[in-house]
Amino acid sequence: MRKNINALIKGTLFAAVITLVLVLIFAVVIKFTDINDSFIKPVNQIIKVFSIFIGVRVLFSKCQSNGFAYGAILGALYTILIFTLISFFTGFENFSQNLITDLVFGSIIGAICGVICKTSKK
């Protein structure tokens, strides 16, 4: 059990670091190009999905548990961690419907990635 929790924490942190790096790279691209604002939200969603997927891969490299449940937990933890980090850096402390939506989205994506990663290992 402790091994699974450590793997869950490691996967979540790994996903958060990937997100921060990719968001910084995307911010530089936005600064030096003329990207339409409507393009930003879809790219951010792609970054979230990619980061959760990589985090789940890291999780299951160390953990042999239920892919659906652990993937969903990682997605939820990731969402809370990213929300906390962004709130810290931007000073935005609004607990809103968007956070709940992102939490559900992160959990569902995590669960799907968990199932994919777990079945692809077999």
Image: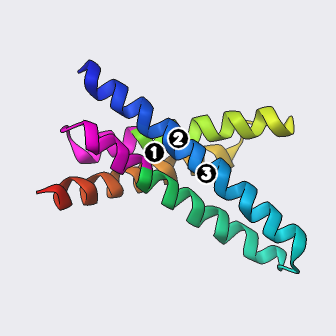
- In the rendered image, residue 38 lying in the magenta stretch gets the answer no
Question: Which numbered marker is on residue 40?
Answer: none
Q: Residue at x 21, y 52 (%)?
A: 118
Q: Do the numbered discs 1 and 2 sit on residues whose CB atoms are within 8 Å?
A: yes
Q: Do the numbered discs 2 and 3 sit on residues whose CB atoms are within 8 Å?
A: yes
- Answer left or right for 7 relative to 23: left
Asked if one can make out residue 93 in the rendered structure from this viewpoint, the answer is: no
Question: Which numbered marker is on residue 19?
Answer: 3
Give the magenta-colored segment's residue range: 55-73
Give coordinates of residue 26: x percent, y percent: 74, 64
Q: Residue at x 23, y 21 (%)?
A: 1
Question: Which numbered marker is on residue 78?
Answer: 2
- The kind of secondary structure element at disc 1 is helix
30 lies above or below 51: below
Give coordinates of residue 23: x percent, y percent: 70, 56
Give coordinates of residue 73: x percent, y percent: 39, 38
- The kind of secondary structure element at disc 3 is helix
Which amino acid type is shown beneath numbered disc 2? Tyr
Identify the mark nearer the N-term, 2 or 3.
3
Q: Nearer the viewer, mark 2 or mark 3?
A: 3
Mark 3 surroundings within 10 Å by alpha-carbon count, few (fewer than 14), some (14 through 19), many (20 or more): many
Q: CA distance from mark 1 to mark 2?
A: 5 Å
Which amino acid type is shown beneath numbered disc 3? Thr
